[in-house]
Image (spheres, grey):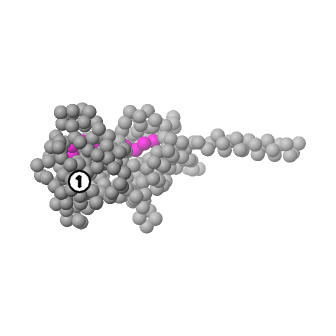
């Protein structure tokens, strides 16, 4: 009888662990504080990167400020590559991911998004021709090839669909050139223009490499959001994150971080 009882207990524990394996790894401490697992990119300077064993950058600093406002939560930041982070969010391995992500109908269906954005991706044109000021001026020009997926590709496809009279010809490439190399190709005259979000460290590259590059005003503004694992429990958490972000905007803290890491206040475009 004793052996049978032990066996039943053992089997019960296995079933319990199996049931919990797909849930988010966050737990509550004895004081009621819930630990939130947050995945951030480890190599996406200035958005987020690892330095001396610590995650630093724009989004880690925002997360720290949000964490300070939420007494019932404690954030644990983990460096995770972009694709792995979203897969981890889908399975509940992470409670939240911070990657400078755009809002979309698909993401609003799959995840919880705070009511407030945490920043903005400003799509700009980097060119050697000061006469190029907006998207219409790119008709007939040589554009640095973009990756066949992602924000820039989707933006250009949408532009051509919505503006057939100003269709922009462009190629795609998986060559994996750095942003510095792409900017140098514009500076050399190999290409007329490069289209990129402005939060990828271009201003520092242009300054450090002494490139003759003209940067336009934003041709499109994409607000960026944290994505949160969709559960009933997390609905309240998402609401509190949104309230915290709103307070940080009103206090000017997010604008300060934007200027610190991107050399511009992206929130003036809201």
Q: Nearer the viewer, residue 269 or 35?
A: 269
Give residue 203's position: percent from left, percent from top.
Answer: 24, 58
Give residue 200's position: percent from left, percent from top.
Answer: 30, 54
Total residue callouts: 1
Give residue 184's position: percent from left, percent from top.
Answer: 24, 60
Which residue is found at the position 43% from the left and 57% from the top? 42
**Which quadrant of the figure contains the C terminus?**
top left
Whether residue 223 is in magenta: the answer is yes
- Name of the residue lying farthest toward the right: 1
Q: Secondary structure at mark 1?
A: loop
Q: Main secondary structure of the magenta part?
A: strand
Which residue is found at the position 23% from the left and 42% from the top? 169
**Which quadrant of the figure contains the N terminus?**
top right
Q: Nearer the viewer, residue 42 or 3?
A: 42
User: Measured along the vertical axis of the image, is residue 74 above or below residue 104?
Assistant: below
Range shown magenta = 218-228
- Name of the residue lying farthest toward the left: 131
User: Measured along the vertical axis of the image, is residue 130 above or below residue 11?
Assistant: below
Q: Nearer the viewer, residue 83 or 143?
A: 143
Which residue is found at the position 66% from the left and 44% from the top? 17
192 to the left or right of 117: left
The residue that mark 1 highlights is 264
Binning the other alpha carbons within 10 Å of mark 1 as few (below 14), some (14 to 19) or many (20 upward) gives some
Camera sees residue 199: yes
Give residue 106's position: percent from left, percent from top.
Answer: 41, 34
Quarter of the image where one finds residue 185: bottom left
Q: Nearer the viewer, residue 253 or 18?
A: 18
Quarter of the image where one finds residue 49: bottom left
Whether residue 36 is in magenta: the answer is no
Which residue is found at the position 18% from the left and 52% from the top? 192
Camera sees residue 215: no
């Amino acid at each position: 009888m004793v052996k049978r009882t032990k066996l039943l207990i053992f089997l019960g524990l296995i079933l319990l662990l199996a049931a919990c394996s797909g849930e988010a790894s966050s737990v509550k401490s004895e004081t009621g504080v819930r630990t939130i697992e947050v995945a951030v990119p480890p190599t996406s300077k200035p958005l987020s990167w690892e330095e001396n064993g610590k995650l630093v950058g724009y989004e880690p600093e925002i997360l720290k400020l949000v964490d300070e406002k939420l007494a019932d939560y404690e954030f644990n930041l983990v460096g995770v590559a972009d694709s792995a982070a979203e897969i981890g969010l889908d399975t509940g391995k992470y409670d939240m991911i911070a990657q400078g992500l755009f809002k979309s109908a698909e993401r609003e269906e799959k995840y919880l998004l705070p009511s407030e954005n945490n920043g903005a991706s400003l799509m700009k044109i980097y060119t050697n021709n000061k006469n190029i000021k907006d998207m219409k001026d790119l008709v007939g020009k040589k554009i640095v090839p973009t990756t066949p997926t992602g924000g820039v590709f989707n933006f250009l496809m949408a532009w051509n669909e919505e503006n057939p009279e100003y269709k922009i010809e462009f190629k795609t490439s998986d060559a994996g050139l750095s942003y510095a190399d792409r900017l140098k190709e514009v500076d050399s005259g190999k290409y007329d223009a490069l289209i990129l979000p402005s939060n990828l460290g271009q201003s520092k590259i242009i300054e450090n490499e002494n490139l003759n590059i003209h940067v336009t005003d934003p041709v499109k503004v994409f607000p960026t959001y944290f994505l949160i694992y969709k559960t009933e429990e997390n609905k309240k958490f998402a609401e509190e994150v949104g309230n915290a972000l709103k307070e940080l905007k009103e206090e000017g803290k997010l604008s300060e971080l934007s200027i610190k890491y991107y050399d511009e206040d992206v929130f003036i475009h809201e």
